[in-house]
Amino acid sequence: MYKDLDPLLHSQLRLAIISMLVVADKVEFTYIKEQTNAASGNISIQVKNLEDAGYIEVEKTFKNKYPKTMLSITKKGRKAFEAYINDLKKYISPK
Amino acid sequence: MCLNKYINIAIMNQNDLTAKESFSIIEKAISSIKTSYKESAQIFLLWGWILSLAWFTQFIILKILQNKDYDQIRFYSIGNWIVLILIGFIFQFFIIRKINKEKKVSSYLEDYLKSLWMVVGVSFCVAIFIGIKMEIALLPIILLIAGIGTTTTGLLIRFRPLVIGGATFFIFSIAATFVSGEYLNLLVGAAIICGHLVPGYLLKSAKE
């Protein structure tokens, strides 16, 4: 039924990650973990998928000697998200 | 239902994500991004204290040295400003470093506010140059620029006391045209207390 939707975004965790990044300039990895309650490994895989697709950027720094990973959305990611929303609308109210 | 519970349920039905469920995930993910501007209060309080102190000490310097020669007054006045502004920037550096370390979400609005206050800072410098060059009263213009920055910040973060604080700068700006001499320093000090310190403390104690 939902074959037209971007398969990269039509996934619970990836959709949640990209939605958070749409409204914030940068979001820390641990914040996503806290909010989604998903396992770190699972989030890492989804982040890698989104990064490989060019939808998000990953910035690794250090906070009190511990690694700090900040995520942000790219222009391509924003466009893909907008397209995904428009495609979703068609299913909610098909003409 | 909060986002993590929703995702857990959705993961169980991995392949059955409906359009409505997708919208729900989007909605919950977006609402989970909470940005707090309470840390901005620390910057408002820092500069509120530094600047009000600078204007009040300027008043004291002018009062004590009123019968001394111009060079001596100028030396203490400039020294007063340089020392306090320098202290302000040192504290600001450490406060911002601490905020950035603890921050998990940075919003677009923070970037707008940073740009706004950079423009305000440049406007202060330009106004000071124009004031000196054209030998015109500077303080009403300085208060007006402070009012623009503060009111806009209040409107952007939707914090009414800051909007009102910014508006008081406009009133003090007009009032400054009726006051002259060393008492202008007291007026500006009072303007900073009303426009920065009071809203700064209210922002600090505000609920999330």
Image (cartoon, coloured by chain):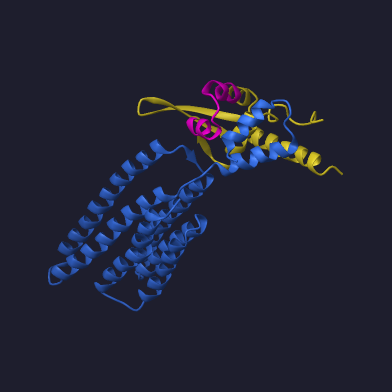
* Magenta residues, dominant SS class: helix
The residue positioned 33% from the left and 44% from the top of the image is B95
Which of these two is toward me, B80 or B9?
Answer: B9
Vertical position of residue B153 compared to residue B21: above or below: below
Looking at the figure, which quarter contains the N terminus of chain B? top right
Image coords of residue A66 (percent x, y): 39, 25
User: Start and end of the magenta stretch?
Assistant: A30-47
Which of these two is toward me, B72 or B37?
Answer: B37
- The answer to whether B41 appears left or right of A88 in the picture is left
Vertical position of residue B161 compared to residue A74: above or below: below
- The answer to whether B137 appears left or right of A30 in the picture is left
Image coords of residue A95 (percent x, y): 87, 44
The residue positioned 40% from the left and 67% from the top of the image is B169
Whether residue B121 appears in this view of the structure is: yes
Chain letter, yellow: A
Query: Looking at the image, which residue sits at the far right?
Result: A95
Chain letter, blue: B
The question of residue A38 being in magenta is answered with yes
Query: Looking at the image, which residue sits at the far bottom?
Result: B178
